[in-house]
Structures are given as structure tokens and as C-alpha cells.
Image (cartoon, rainbow, N blue to C red):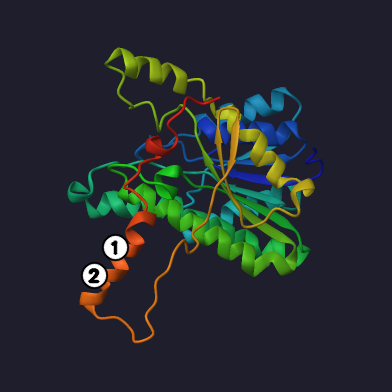
Amino acid sequence: MTLDGKVAIVTGAGGGIGRAIAIAMAQAGAAVVINDVGVSLTGEGGSATPAEETKATIEASGGRAVINIDSVADWDSAQRIVQSAVDAFGRLDVVVNNAGILRDAFFHKMTPQDWASVIDVHLNGSFYVSRAAAEIFRQQESGAFVHMTSTSGLIGNNAQANYSAAKMGILGLSKTIALDMQRYNVRSNCVAPFAWGRMTANIKAETPDQIKRVETLKQMTPEKNAPLVVALASDAASAINGQVFAVRRNEIFLMSQSRPIRSVQRDDGWTPELVQQHALPTLLPSMLPLDRSQDVFTWDPA
């Protein structure tokens, strides 16, 4: 597995999963653009220090990297992120859309700003950076996108309407990129990572069971997600397109995508009464419960 000669942009690469991916990309031979604005978990502040630390780690092992501190949540800034790869290394082959913030709140308490800020970074940011890179990929007839989604969107979670909606939107974005750009040998896939870090450190650890659970979750380090992302970015994965994966410590899952699971029909059509009397009772056994991510992934990570 090699990325020799390739150039990769990793957004949100100043820490956590993004940092682990950027380092792994460099170890595989890629030159890396470390994009990070250095904000807090909720999107406040800004510092170049996290990106500089990632760059120092890469260069200490003989890798090549440059820093870009433009925000993904702006169209013009996204153009500069992509241009920085071309300016520094002369080309672009891989985009990893990882940048993100959290502003959790129960839906009935979520403010418009909490909604918009998370959508801007996760969903709009993934579109802006991908769209900026698309013309380069189209002209050279090659390229790979890897987008970070989440089981909070794929399955569900409390108090994350903004984050869940953004992550489901990324799934639709990735699939359409895969469909639209396959003619140019460009592929687009999603990864739902599990990792202990800034976005999970607020999980309660008060009871003995909770403490034991958290200690297990801490073993899901950000680095566990990097091998799959590097593999999807390589030419060896040229046949993998439009897929959704999840990584949980040493487990890799291929996730399902929405398909019809059961149907009912009447030659004479339906009335509201017939729907209530026949259609809904027939479909009820196949309906999905109100699961959260932790209700589906009930076993400890392997």
C-alpha cells in the first residue's frame, strides 16, 4: 500500500482523527496539506499551533507537509485550501473531509446559530472543498474523496439534530459525487469513525458500569481509523466507490444504504382509512425502532 507521489488534503488535521490520518498519509508516501483553523470543539477561537504540531510530527519522520489555516466553511477559503496543495506540491490526488465542530442540544432547545454553524463546517465545508478539488480531479481523470460521516446520522443519537443532519447530508453528497464523477475515474466514499477524543470526552463516567465502558471506549484511539482511509485513498482501491464504512477499534464495517424493505399495494389505490387499517399494520413488523448508535453497537469494540 503506497501513496508515493500523491498529494492529499486532510481538513481538521490539527488533532484527533484528522491528525492521525494526515500522519498515516505521510507515512504511506503522500505529501500532505494540513488544513486546520485551530478552533475549540464548538468552533470558537483559532490557532495555528495544532497544525504546526502535526506538521512537526510528519517532518520528523521524513515526510512532507504544509499548513493551511483557511476555513472549510467558506467558498473562497475552500478554493485557497485546494490551491495551497497545487502551489506547494504541484498536484492534488486525495481529499479527506474531516473538519468538524459540535454544538449539541436537544432539538427543542437548539438555536438557529447552533444549527447553522455545524451545517456550515460539516456539510457545506465538505461540499466547498470537494467542489474546489473536482475540477482538478476531472482534468487529470483521477482522484479520491473520503468523507467523515457518523453513526449519529446513519443510525441516530440524542441532542445532535445539527450534527446528525450534516452527517447524513455528507452521505448523499458522497454518493452523488461518486455517480457524477465515476466517468473521470474519481471515487468518493464515506467513513464513520469511532474514536475517543474531544467529541466523545463528555460521555458520563459516574457509575462503575459507565466508568468501565469509558475505559473500553478510550481504547478506540484516532489512529485506528487511519488505515482504512489511507487504503481508500490508494490506487489499490480504485474499484471502491460510493460506499459507506465504519471503523471501531479493530473492526471495519460495511454499512448498509437505504433500500426498500417491504411494500404493500392495492389495485384500487388507498384511502387514509385503508392505509390505517391495512397498510400500516402490514408494514409495522418491518419498521425500524428508534435506535441510537449505542443501541445498535451494543458489544464492546474488538
In the picture shown, does residue 46 fall above or below 197? below
Q: In the rendered image, which residue does mark 1 sit on?
A: 281
Instruction: Pick whichever, 279 or 3, lies toward us.
Output: 279
Mark 2 touching mark 1, by CB under 8 A? yes
Q: Amino acid at mark 1?
A: Pro
In the picture shown, does residue 202 fall above or below 165? above
Give the secondary structure at mark 2.
helix
Query: Which residue is pictured at 52% across the width and 56% down the height?
Result: 257
Number of labels in the image equals: 2
Question: Residue 15, percent across and down?
Answer: 51, 31
Question: Residue 292, percent across and down?
Answer: 36, 41
Inter-mark Cα distance, 2 to 1? 7 Å
* Disc on res. 277: 2
Query: Which residue is pictured at 33% across the width and 26% down the height?
Result: 203
- 226 relative to 150 in the view: left or right: right
Query: Which residue is pictured at 60% across the width and 28% down the height?
Result: 250
Quarter holding the N terminus is top right
Instruction: Pick whichever, 129 or 175, lies toward us.
Output: 175
Based on the displayed image, in which of its 4 quarters is residue 35 positioned?
top right
Q: How many residues crowd mark 2 within 10 Å: few (<14), some (14–19), many (20+)?
A: few
* Outermost residue to the left: 108
Quarter holding the C terminus is top right
Q: Is residue 14 visible?
A: no
Question: Residue 260, percent across and down?
Answer: 47, 64
Question: Residue 91, percent across and down?
Answer: 74, 53
Q: Amino acid at mark 2?
A: Gln
Give the secondary structure at mark 1.
helix
Q: Is residue 181 visible?
A: yes
Based on the displayed image, in which of its 4 quarters is residue 267 positioned?
bottom left
Instruction: Pick whichever, 182 or 139, lies toward us.
Output: 182
In the picture shown, does residue 42 fall above or below 262? above
